[in-house]
Amino acid sequence: MKGVCNMRKNKFLLIFSILVYIFLFAPLIIIGITAFGGESYIAFPPKSFSVKWFANIFSSETFMNTLKTSMEISLIATIAALILGVPAAYALSRFNFKGKTILKNFFFSPVIVPGIVVGFSLFQFMIIKLKLPIYTSLLIGHTIIIIPYIIRVIGSSLEGFDYAIEEAAMSLGAGKVETFFKVVFPNITSGVIAAFMLAFINSFNNVPVSIFLTGPGISTLPISMMSYVEYNYDPTVSALSVLLMIMTIIVMFIVEKTLGLSYFLK
């Protein structure tokens, strides 16, 4: 009787898992198929085959300009987040001090708090109160939201580091900064690379913060896609989504080969 119940339970879990995978991947498959439709509107299944919508992406001045802006913002914000996040991750991993837990929670707050709340708060503070330029506000906003990814990934890399090596180097006369760059940093290079890629892709694909911090003449690619869908119903956005999915898959593949996704589950 117990064996029969276990079989039923396993069968239910299998069916449930299949349904979850269908729920997750079916929309992606539909988007991928509609991207190659020949009709002037999104149709599933498509009645004809065409790749003209991919060509339409590169002929669109709006998409190309916002792609450039997204690349610039993501790259600069990721570098800035690394400059701020690596020392923070090192300090949180290396030292025990009063308020460490509070500080760690503070760094992770942009991830814990809903993105739409973070975006609105940054809009009120930087654009309304401080009256900062849109580009500067967008750059600061993206830096803030990706710092938690930097700290989490670098922190995971530092968990396996033996600080006795660092102490040995310092006992031989090396300074703290020299020790960090010559002893600690080389041992967490894979983590830095993985953190850079994850932070970049999260910044590039961000919508909740970008939608509040963009303005006339300055927008990111995801926001441009949303605006395009409001007035057009052709498969151009599907084609663009396919390209972004491919880019994300490539980045995640490199991250997995560089560091391993198990690091993010620690």
Image: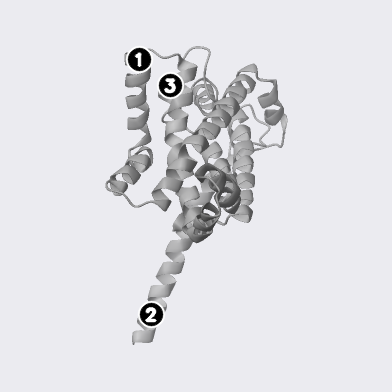
- What element does badge 1 sit on? loop
Percent x, y of residue 145: 43, 35
192 relative to 42, above or below: below
- The residue that appears at 53% across and 34% down in the rendered structure is 78
How busy is the neighbourhood of tag 1: few (under 14 within 10 Å), some, or many (20 plus)?
few
Does residue 24 appear in the picture of this structure? yes
Foreground pick, 195 / 40: 195
> What residue is drawn where x is 56% and y is 44%?
178
Quadrant location of the N terminus in the rendered image: bottom left
Q: What's under tag 1, amino acid-wise? A: Leu
Cα gap from disc 2 to disc 1, whole angstroms: 62 Å
- Is 50 in front, or is 71? 71
Q: Earlier in the sequence, mark 3 or mark 2?
A: 2
Under mark 3, the amino acid is Leu
Q: Position of residue 131 (x, y in %)?
A: 38, 12
Q: Nearer the viewer, residue 80 or 7?
A: 80
Q: Amino acid at mark 2?
A: Asn
Q: Residue 213, which numbered label? A: 3
Q: Earlier in the sequence, mark 3 or mark 1?
A: 1
Left or right relative to 200: residue 2: left
Whole-number angstrom distance, CA of label 3 to CA of label 2: 53 Å
Q: Which residue is mark 1?
A: 130
Image quarter hosting the C terminus: bottom left
Q: Secondary structure at mark 3?
A: helix
Q: Position of residue 247 (x, y in %)?
A: 63, 40
- For disc 2, the marked residue is 6
Which numbered disc, 3 or 1, marks the residue closer to the eye? 1
